[in-house]
Amino acid sequence: MLNVPKAQFIYLQRPDNGEWLTIGRYQVGSAVGTGSFRYTHNYVHADLPWVIDPVNLPFLTEDDQSAPRYSGLHDVLRDACPDAWGQTLLQREHSLPEGTHQARYLILASNADRWGALAVGTKPTPSIAQTSYPRLQQLPLVARELAALSEQRPALSLGLRRQLIRAAAIGGARPKATLRDDEGQYWLVKPRISSDITDIPALEHFAQQWGAASGLHFASTLLHTIKEGHSAVSVLRYDRVGERRLMCVSTASLLQTEYPDNLGQTDLWSYPRLADALRIIGAPEEDRRELFGRMVFNAICGNDDDHVRNHAIVYKHEQRRWRLTPAFDVVPNPVETPRKLTLQLSNGRFDISRSAVLADADRFGFSSSEEAANYLDMLMVQVTNGFDQVAHWLEHDGQQMLRTRMTQNVALLAAISKHDI
Ligand SMILES: Nc1ncnc2c1ncn2[C@@H]1O[C@H](COP(=O)(O)OP(=O)(O)OP(=O)(O)O)[C@@H](O)[C@H]1O
Ligand SMILES: [Mg+2]
């Protein structure tokens, strides 16, 4: 019924030497909505330190571990599947019905461009398809082909279209592709689409530059103007170092919740919970402060698309630990100034206010509320100064709109409310 082969082998590119290893097996269960994973005997006995998900599959055991979410697919394997964009392409390509099991997308998506360092196959020994990536210089062609694909128009270049469909394993809702630059770095390219009411790539580039100018750790971006009114943003991939793939886990997985939310569990979506998870998995304190900074930045710029697949961790072999990835997909709401974020700023509170930002400050590693308040005040100065450095990336109206929003939100975050007394 599911049309999913019984057992799938899970491969990992070793963080130390880049060799591919078979580390586990995933099996769809015979009861509907169940599935199990086990690390392989050889991997468990190889005396290697890496687990693929430090929260949900943290023990190197040969026991079957069942999947509590995603109708029986383990969180980290769901992370290696496409989201809305890639799933749409696979649905068209393979005539899949609505409601197709996630495990089917896991298998149908090509290993060539999966997020992170996992791959999937039916053979006990790793076999990872190689693909050639379009070059960054080909970006205008890629953007046109992505537009044609998303509007269901015929291919402009059949070869490029095949390449783009093959590489549609990465997540997110917008059309996107991975391109390679002359130095061998990989960039995620997201062009403007016809339904965008404003120049979203410019807004994303601006916000990423603004975050960096505010002293936060944001992924590098480039803005490309293709022709009048057509633009694309490219974001440096943090899960690639040249050809080497780095293990990643989404914060949906860290928070043990589904995205999209099919379970009505947004009460689990929370920055302080995420900070707790970072502490528990051994990320350094600076990552919790950085997360606090991103929460404040999202509040100030009005990015209320800060959902649980828009934050992630990456395994850094040289440090032997998981780290928060650089910030990505930070886009101020182009339509209205949000009053709330998607993740709670403190327990039970989604509202953008000073008291909500500071209520759980200890969970982000601050030793006192005074220390957190001082950090918040310092950050607001940096974000305000950062704006002027990068405002030129926006047209006049966009600048005005966001400057006004920033001023209002900084006033909100500086205000002492009755909660603070
Ligand atoms: N710089 C990056 N390096 C590696 N992976 C990335 C990077 N940026 C995004 N990703 C991965 O790709 C996915 C989709 O990217 P992104 O969130 O930018 O796309 P989107 O289509 O705008 O998303 P959304 O559905 O949230 O609007 C992310 O959830 C993340 O897993
Ligand atoms: Mg996203």
Image: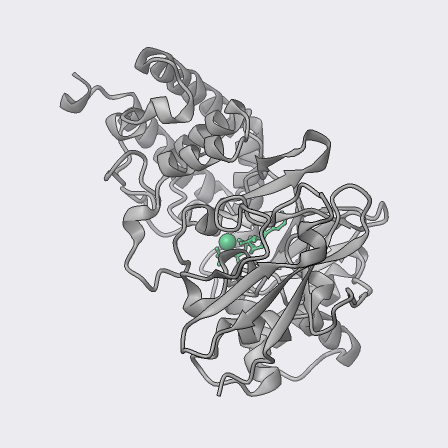
Type of colouring: one colour
In percent of width and height, residue 311 lies at 50, 45
Going by the picture, which residue comes out furthest to the left? 418
Measured as percent of width and height from the top left, residue 246 is found at: 69, 46
Q: Nearer the viewer, residue 129 or 192?
A: 129
Which residue: 38% across, 14% down?
A: 367
Q: Is residue 292 visible?
A: yes
Q: Residue at x 28, y 48 (%)?
A: 267
Above or below, 339 against 147 in this view is above
Q: How many marks?
A: 0
Query: Which residue is rendered at x = 52% and y = 51% of the image?
Result: 57
Residue 87 appears in the rendering:
no
For residue 22, side relative to residue 366 (left or right)? right
Instruction: Name the image quarter holding residue 152.
Output: bottom right
Residue 143 occupies quadrant: bottom right
Looking at this view, is 326 or 102 the one in front?
A: 102
Image location (x, y in percent) of residue 95: 56, 88
Q: Which residue is at the front of the view, 363 or 186?
A: 363
Measured along the vertical axis of the image, is residue 92 above or below residue 131? below
At which x and y percent is residue 167? 69, 67
Closest to the observer, 298 or 388: 298
State left or right for residue 405 relative to residue 46.
left
Q: Is residue 59 above or below residue 71?
A: above
Q: Quadrant of the C terminus?
A: top left
On screen, residue 74 versus residue 189, left or right, reads left
The residue at 43%/71% (across/down) is 34
